[in-house]
Amino acid sequence: MAKEEAGIDRLPIDLLAYIFGLITPFTDLAQASSVCRKWKEGVKQSLAQRNSLSFSGWKMDDDSTARLVRLACNLKELDISRSRWDCQITDNRL
C-alpha cells in the first residue's frame, strides 16, 4: 500500500497562507516557515497579505526585522513600540 500524505500537506498554499495569517507571534511563524518549503511559501504569502505588523515588545535584530518587513508588501502600519527602536510607523507618519 502506498504511503499517503498527511492531511495538512495536501492543503493548497493559499489556504496555508490564510491559516498562517491568523498566527501573530513571529516566533511561531518563524518555526512554521522552517517545517518545509511549502510552509515557508505559505508564511511568505501570509506576510504579503498583511496590512500591519507589530513588533511591540520584541527585541529582534535588524536583519530579521528587515526580512519580515520586506515580505509584507501591503504594509500600511508597522508598530515597533516598546521594541528595540520604540516608535510606530504608518503610511502617514512616524
Image: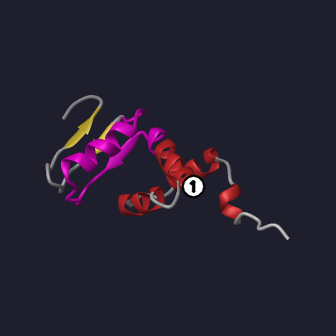
Identify the image's colour scheme: rainbow, by chain, secondary structure or one colour: secondary structure
Q: Quadrant of the C terminus?
A: top left
Seen at 45% across and 59% down, the residue is: 34
Seen at 85% across and 71% down, the residue is: 1
Q: Nearer the viewer, residue 1 or 50?
A: 1
The number of callouts visible is 1
> Residue 66 lies in magenta, yes or no?
yes
Residue 47 lies in what quarter of the image? top left
* Residue of label 1: 19
Give the x, y percent position of residue 22.
51, 55
Seen at 42% across and 63% down, the residue is: 31
Residue occupying the far top of the picture: 92
Q: Is residue 14 above or below residue 2?
A: above
Q: Is residue 54 above or below residue 27?
A: above
Residue 56 lies in what quarter of the image? bottom left
Residue flagged by tag 1: what amino acid is it?
Ile
Q: Nearer the viewer, residue 45 or 53?
A: 45
Residue occupying the far left of the picture: 85
Q: Is residue 89 above or below residue 59?
A: above
Give the x, y percent position of residue 67.
31, 43
Find the magenta span and give its range: 47-75
Give the x, y percent position of residue 65.
27, 47
Seen at 57% across and 51% down, the residue is: 38
Give the x, y percent position of residue 30.
40, 58
Residue occupying the far right of the picture: 1
Residue 87 lies left or right of residue 34; in this view the side is left
Few, some or many C-alpha atoms within 10 Å of disc 1 (few <14, some 14-19, many ≥20)?
Answer: few
> Residue 51 lies in magenta, yes or no?
yes
Residue occupying the far bottom of the picture: 1
Residue 3 lies left or right of residue 88; in this view the side is right
Q: Secondary structure at mark 1?
A: helix
